[in-house]
Amino acid sequence: MRKIWNVLTATTMVAAACGFAGAAAAADNKEVQMLHWWTSGGEAAALNVIKEALAKQGYTWKDVPVAGGGGEAAMTTLKAMVAAGNPPTASQILGYFALDYADAGKLGDVTPLAVKGDWAKVIPTALQKFTTTNGKWDAVPINIHSVNWIWLNKAVMDKIGGTEPKNFDEFLALLDKAKAAGVIPLALGGQPWQEATMFDSVVMSTGGPEFYKKAFIDLDESALKSDTMKKSFDNLAKLRGYVDPNFAGRDWNLATAMVVKGDALAQVMGDWAKGEFKVANKEPGKDYLCYRFPGTDGTVIYNTDMFAFFNVSADRKDAQNALAAASMDPAVQSAFNVIKGSVPARIDVSDAAFDMCGKKGIADVKAANAKGTFLGSMAQNYAQPPAIGSGAYHDVVTKFFHGQIKTSDQAVAELDKAINAAM
Amino acid sequence: MTVAADRLETAPTRLPARHSTTTRVVIYGLLILFAIIYVAPLVVMVMTSLKPLDEVTSGNMFYFPHDLTFEPWTKAWGTTCVGLTCEGIKGYVWNSVKMVVPAVVISSLLGALNGYVLTKWRFPGHKLVFGMMLFACFIPFQSVLIPMATILGKLGAIGQSLTDMTGFSFGFGNPTVNLVLVHVVYGLGFTTLFFRNYYETFPTELIKAAQIDGASFFQIFRRILLPNSAPIFIVTVIYQFTNIWNDFLFGSTFAAGDSAPMTVALYNIVNTSTGVIEYNVNMAAAIIAAAPTLFVYIVAGRYFVRGLMAGAVKG
Amino acid sequence: MTTAIDPIVADAAVRGPRRDFRDRLRNWLPRIVLAPSFALVLFFVYGFNIWTLLISFTNSKAFTNLNFIGWGNYAKLWTWTFETDPPSNWYTALVNMVVFGGLYVIFCLALGLTLAILLDQKIRGEGILRPLYLYPLALSFIVTGTAWKLFLDPRIGLEKAVHDLGWTSFHFDWVVNPRMMIYCVAIAGIWQTSGFVMAMFLAALRGIDSEILKAAQIDGASAYATYRRIIIPIMRPVFMSALIILTHMAIKSYDLVLSVTGKNPGGAAELPSTFMYSYTFTRNQTAVGSASAIIMLMTIAAIMVPYLYSELREKA
């Protein structure tokens, strides 16, 4: 016992000494401290593009990665860093969280760069709501993901003689064909965010962009309680009939794997699903197909990753500006998004380096932005703040999908009630 | 002294001393059955960590690896990406060690002292003090994060001005020191509970006798209680070591980045929002991350018996 | 507690005509030793609790503010407590807490005690067996949760393996059935912690005075009777430690719940801890999260304070 005791005491002393020594290092003003949750292979590789662009200009990168729960843990860390009066140079952030920090006066200002680069012209107008506060740029978008995609296994498609479904009914007919052929028609991960993300597309397909905008962006009560919304829930219930019995709680990538292997025909998922196909050495057009969710062609339900810039001391501003400029550089955005599987947030970036699905994504964003059908995802908190998106909306959709809410009438009533309670 | 010495020399005490053969077969049978149930998930994890990824996602998890590979292990240790630096989790071991060891030692020692005072040197109101410390075990950690961050920020500012004044920061504001503080504070309730309830059954006559012999408060603690505390020290150290080593919430909130403990690195490997999940690497990383704790269990476990046998009082 | 009669009362040592500084210091020394710990707990636990209590009366959203709105957040939770069709998240959290907490605590105690008693029978190979029961605690929850989820998944785990062995009617789909999910969380939790409870009981068994056991043996008491009448009653303080540890773990289980159930499908695996975290940090309704934290603390107090009171009073 005593021996152990001595060892422990010694270690404590050494550790304490090291701790104190470390505290003395002062912050370097050429240092970019960046909080993010991109820790897995492809994501980290994408972010590395920016790190290297900065390294060329002589800036060092101080990585603060915190994964967990799709950014939840990182947002908690960010809150703590800001509460301690010690914010990072920049942080990866999702739409409404950036607005919260802007309201609290915690964000910095990169407007001079924005004016010089004419960012207002090249960033889709809908996104600028999240990147500017009273005309002041305090964040930049690095990419655009969209969620209204379906991913299909081409071999299964060929086997059942399927063609691209153009509307919801054709989609159901296609799923029926797969069912008849003994393939799981729809691969779904039964987690609240996945079900809600699929429902975004269903609503868009059922009601069209006008309705989607009225219900989810404007939160119009008559739209929320309308028959169209009821019909959307009914359509979701129809899709429920095409999933396998073991779907509850499944991770999204396992659902994608079912499509990759040909156990299932299709998955409704955001374009990050492409990464899974890529890892399995599958090629778009040859091994798998990417279509817009039937009935949503011409619209883009987006979510985006942004970097928010914090109010840092004067000696760190220079590094902050360098990061902002690098993130908005067209070459960087192209390289970043080719790796990440998303499309550039700047609509003026060339699509030369992208694959077939990426090219279609870029063209769709451009067209949708021009037509005003570029709309935020409710499930991904780009239509409404998290209290409503991740909160009320996820709750009602998942309870409906798992049978705790039994009818579409009840679902519509519950959705309205839950949204009101969350406001 | 003789009471204790006798008690310790005959320990460990089993009862009854001899079982019939049937009873022994039943006992061993049960123990082995439970062992198999407890070990099964670990076996699956180890097998998964030895398979290539496509075999994991397509094959049966209970089958032995078809293409045995140690690559997930080398990857988890040395090359997997924890954020933008792809150097595995090896660099985070020391971060965790230099936080865990002081936190465990300080909180266990304080717990032992508190337990000693609360059982052998009672003062009016000792029950209320103990009750309040106990109840502290139940505070939900999520709700202390933000106030804690504010306080730690203030401490950091004090540290900064101390550095400016004296050239020495005394550790205020250092993430590792912050984490030690946090873990000591929220571990105190448990360590006090363990020691208090253990010392509760410790014969008070021994303390009285020593006091009559003129031993001081600390002499009694060091010479009589500590040598007899091996089992409870082991339980406390196991509990504290495991909890602090595996803590993610405090580690990620107060020490993300360079001084992040191992768990934060492990989470960064395991969690992926829009990327591929490498189950084999995850399992290997989890087992590597657990290795120090497992080591503590096996080493500490030996003292369960030996501590009692060897700790005869020399007073 | 027969062994713990007559604790020393510090004041007794210094009742005398001459109370010099040394005596006074000796008198106060125990309290001085305890003071720093107590001060830390007062500030960091009770101080922060008061802060949480304050916040629960405000309309704090993403950040805390001090715009007081009275009992609004509690009123919300109160209505949710009775919303069963469809079940509100808070209602599900409370029901699951009772189911999960009850199963978890009872099974951990029972298994822990059984294993400790079995191991305490002069077992050969105790050194090998003990860590086998204990090791699950060493593994991080997030990975063991995922492992259990894969392990119990009917498509790739246990059910498939049993089918492959030829028993095709075997059916075990709890982990993908929202109604049964919470039991899977309990299974994983019990597997994880029961070994530690075993260690606590084992430490206590090893600490028991052999004189007592010898006396019992001489009196001809059976092994069962000795355990039931003598050993287990002596271990009451350890039961208290175990119970507190387990309750605390049951209440705070967070990673385990999310990783075993796969992020709470259908909202069916909600627990107060996940509720609290998601309202505070994900849904940016900090005030509601704080109110739920306070209610949880109050509930624990309502259960624990009477128990602790009776436990501590008996020894006076």
Image (tube, rainbow, N blue to C red):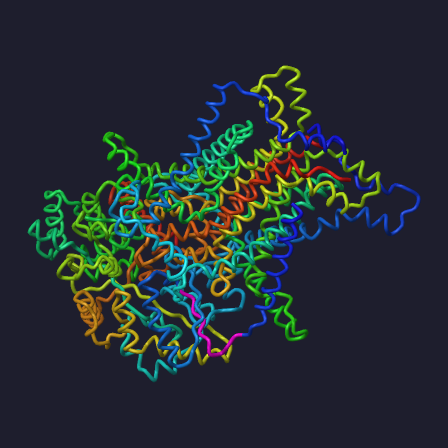
Whether residue B155 is visible, yes or no, is: no
Residue A54 on image: x %, y %:
38, 77
B115 vs A272, left or right, is right
- Residue most toward the left? A161
| Front residue of A178 and C272 | A178
Residue A270 quadrant = bottom left
Q: Main secondary structure of the magenta part?
A: strand
Question: In this rendering, is residue C30 above or below A220?
Answer: above
B293 vs C45, left or right, is left
| Front residue of A86 and A47 | A47
Whether residue A165 is visible, yes or no, is: yes
Residue C61 on image: x %, y %:
45, 59
B294 vs A366, left or right, is right
Residue B156 on image: x %, y %:
59, 67
Question: In this rendering, is residue C309 above or below A279?
Answer: above
For the C terminus of chain C, the image quarter is top right
- Residue most toward the right? C17
Q: Name the residue at 19% across, 43% down.
A: A241
For the N terminus of chain C, the image quarter is top right
Q: Would residue A342 be counted in the magenta stretch?
A: no
Magenta stretch bounds: A27-36
C277 vs A375, left or right, is right
- Residue most toward the top? C220
Question: In this rendering, is residue C240 above or below B277?
Answer: above
Residue B303 on image: x %, y %:
60, 40
Residue A285 quadrant = bottom left
Q: Would residue A28 be counted in the magenta stretch?
A: yes
Tell me how many marks there are.
Answer: 0
